[in-house]
Image (tube, rainbow, N blue to C red):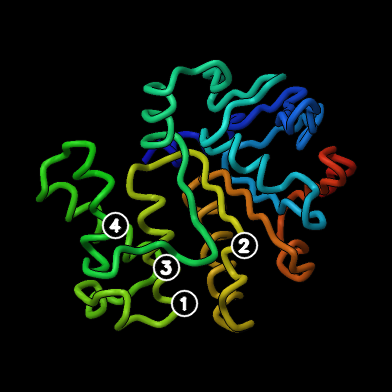
Amino acid sequence: MASEQAKGQKVLRVRDLGREYRLGAHRVSALRETSFELAGGELAALVGPSGSGKTTLLNLLAGLETPTSGEMYVLEQPVHGLSEGQLTEYRRHRVGLVFQFFHLLPNLTAVENVALPLELARRPATEARARAVECLLLAGLPVERHRHTPRRLSGGEQQRVAIARALVAGPPLLLADEPTGNLDQTTGQAVMDLLRMLARDQGTTVIVATHNPDIARQADLVLQLKDGRLVGAAD
């Protein structure tokens, strides 16, 4: 996996990253002059009040939006300035996304949901399914649940499927937006334990956006945003 190869390397380098939006005749800065670095195997918590810029930063890191200033590198390859086609390839291979509400396709089984990104990338179906099973086992979903559709899985199991899907292409960077926000405390902690294991054992660089201080305290690094600026980065 690419993430295993990245362990100990500088995976993410952000320099003076900024994003502005135009509202009528005015320009609004959602993110300003943000800089930090993360190595393979590090888990960072992204914290801050609503409107602080967390979602904007995650969208930029995910290649869902483009910065208006600054630079971003993943494994020393520039992400800023990529074309739409290049950003699509970046999202397929370099970054995995996990959301609060899972976003699984309801008519597909767990295996089919996880294999789908590889099948869309035209990987052979048998290879995609085998890789999906590998990632589901890594994410802690029992084999007997692999052929269940989302409605037959608990919230915690659905999040494990979503994490497996995010990992299936072997990305060095995993972004999780409030991954425990829709789960009870015990299940949420189990998901956080899984993310920490992926960082520690697989070498994946993980960023978890959270409002939960207990979750943030478990990170190697806390990135605190306020009014679009990074106001703190502490171990």
Q: Which of disc 1 and disc 4 is earlier in sequence?
A: 4
- 232 vs 219, left or right, is right
Which of the 4 image quadrants contains residue 4? Answer: top left
Residue name at image x 34 percent, y 73 percent: 141
Q: Residue 114, which numbered label?
A: 4
Task: Give yes or no for contact between labels 3 and 1 (Cβ–Cβ under 8 Å).
Answer: yes
Residue carrying label 1: 156
**Is disc 3 surrounded by few (<14), some (14 to 19) or many (20+) residues within 10 Å?**
many
**Is disc 2 surrounded by few (<14), some (14 to 19) or many (20+) residues within 10 Å?**
some
**Is disc 1 surrounded by few (<14), some (14 to 19) or many (20+) residues within 10 Å?**
many
In this view, the residue in front, 149 or 131, is: 149
Residue name at image x 22 percent, y 42 percent: 120
Q: Residue furthest right?
A: 231
Q: Which of disc 1 and disc 2 is earlier in sequence?
A: 1
Q: Residue furthest front?
A: 24
**Is disc 4 surrounded by few (<14), some (14 to 19) or many (20+) residues within 10 Å?**
many
Q: Residue 160, which numbered label?
A: 3
Which type of secondary structure does the marked residue at label 1 adopt?
helix
Which type of secondary structure does the marked residue at label 3 adopt?
helix
Residue name at image x 22 percent, y 66 percent: 108
Residue 171 placed where, x, y %? 43, 40
Q: Which amino acid does the dot numbered 1 rest on?
A: Gly
Q: Which amino acid does the dot numbered 4 rest on?
A: Val
- Residues at marks 2 and 1, CA–CA distance in whole angstroms: 13 Å
Residue carrying label 2: 178
Residue 180 placed where, x, y %? 59, 70
- 231 vs 159, left or right, is right
